[in-house]
Image: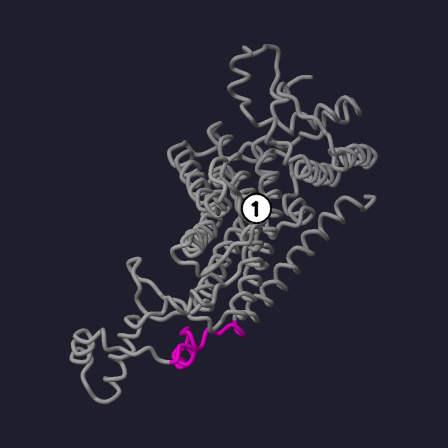
Amino acid sequence: MPKLWEKGYRIDSSIEDFTVGEDYILDKKLVKADVLGSIAHAKMLAKIGILSEQEFSKLKKNLIEIYNSRNFEIKKHDEDVHTAIENHLVEKLGDIGKKIHTARSRNDQVLTDIRIYSKESLIEILSSLLELCSSILEFSRKNEFVPIAGYTHTRKAMPSSVGLWSGAFIESFLDDLIILKTAYELNNQSPLGSAAGYGVSLDIDRQFIAELLGFAKVQKNTLYVQNSRGKIESTIIFSLSQIMNGLAKISNDLILFTSEHFNYFQLPDKICTGSSIMPQKKNPDVLELVRAYSAVVEGNLHTISGITKNILSGYNRDLQLTKEPLIKSFEITNKSISIMAFVFNNLNVNKESCEKSCTKELYATDEAIALVKSGIPFREAYQKVAKNIAGIKIPPIEKNLKAKKHIGATGNLGLDALKRQIDSEKKSIEAEKKEFESAIKKLIHTNQ
């Protein structure tokens, strides 16, 4: 079958192998998105008279067959999903299939695929992240006043609680949610109709296409459409990298705190792997891999930034290499979020070890504050306590935690407010998901 750009000559097979790369494999994840973009584009072509209603109907019927197929094949000589689908349509419909590429380029076609794929993936990530927050919240409530040593400089510092430790990550992920939603908003623009970056000499209706595909708006400037490839992907991966950094910090804490030296938490056997030589070992491999994958996602961010920052305005083939880092980052982040929710749903707290960690020196600052309350200047109180660390007495531990009532302290974690925020965000994401799914369902199932 011919390539979309074919015009009477053939390239050397080594050039084909190098330029195609892994695209024909990666594009299997974009088949449904490409079909949706093609249906919307064909419907627009029918609207402006390039296709008859009968021609559109035949194209749509064949495109939906591809959409519903589980084994649509993309071969290396196809180069990509766009060529594979168009060749399939030409084979089935002849000249009708040859009309579908009117007024579009693979440049805006692949961008449309990526935007649809990213929109679906971001909705999934947003939902998964909120479910993780719910899992951590439940864990925080259950262990709100279980005491544990707080650390600075990897040394014991002040009294803390399991609730304070775990609740910190809820707020971290809710901050990440803001960045994710910004990435979602940037991605939620239709690039289709920008063609190769300079528009076309047909009165196409780009707004019509955007509405059919459930995009919030048209990305207007046709050249910026091409220039934004890599930029928007970088923003998405940055948001994913922030989530992965949070997951890595949890992983690092748990790797340490579940070790025999601390024993604050315990991972059940079903989470741990073993050693091929040491019969006693139960290893937190899953946490170590999450920690490592955070570096992979961050590396993907630098990869895309490096590819896009020094190329001329307009499409350049360099941009082909931004696809894999984006897809891999989505896959890694989604799996890592799910794994961490599983960990929190099965994580056990060793209350006795946690309480034992709260040794007398942790209460030195509390002692100094108590002296301040009696009228002694803080620096004087600091010096007095510093000279008598051995004389510090451990107060009732839970009472000490509950007494710290200012916003965000161990006695006032604001877990109810966090639950309200999580629930509100879940409703918002679910509404966005339903709106997008409704647009796609309408595009596929309407007869016109």
Q: Is residue 123 left or right of residue 284?
A: right
Location of residue 382 (image quadrant): bottom left
In the image, 146 versus 435, the foreground residue is 146
Residue 331 lies, with reference to residue 75, above or below; the image says below
Q: Residue at x 54, y 17 (%)?
A: 17
In the image, 42 versus 287, the foreground residue is 287
Which quadrant holds the C terminus? top right
Q: Residue at x 74, y 25 (%)?
A: 88
Q: Residue at x 81, y 46 (%)?
A: 446
Count of residue discs? 1
Location of residue 330 (image quadrant): top right
Neighbours of disc 1 within 10 Å: few (<14), some (14-19), many (20+): few
Colour scheme used in the picture? Answer: one colour
Q: Is residue 315 left or right of residue 95?
A: left
Does 194 lie within the magenta span? no
Q: In the rendering, at what x and y percent does residue 102 appear?
A: 67, 30
Q: In the rendering, at what x and y percent does residue 52 appear?
A: 80, 34
In the image, 317 versus 190, the foreground residue is 317
Q: Is residue 416 left or right of residue 439?
A: left
Residue 141 lies, with reference to residue 266, above or below; the image says below
Which quadrant holds the N terminus? top right
Does 409 lie within the magenta span? yes
Q: In the rendering, at what x and y percent does residue 250 appear?
A: 45, 55
Q: Secondary structure at mark 1?
A: helix
Which amino acid, mark 1?
Lys
Which residue is situated farthest in the front direction here?
279
Give the residue at mark 1.
Answer: 335
Q: In the rendering, at what x and y percent does residue 107 appear?
A: 56, 32
Task: State which region is magenta.
Answer: 396-417
In the image, 358 versus 221, the foreground residue is 358
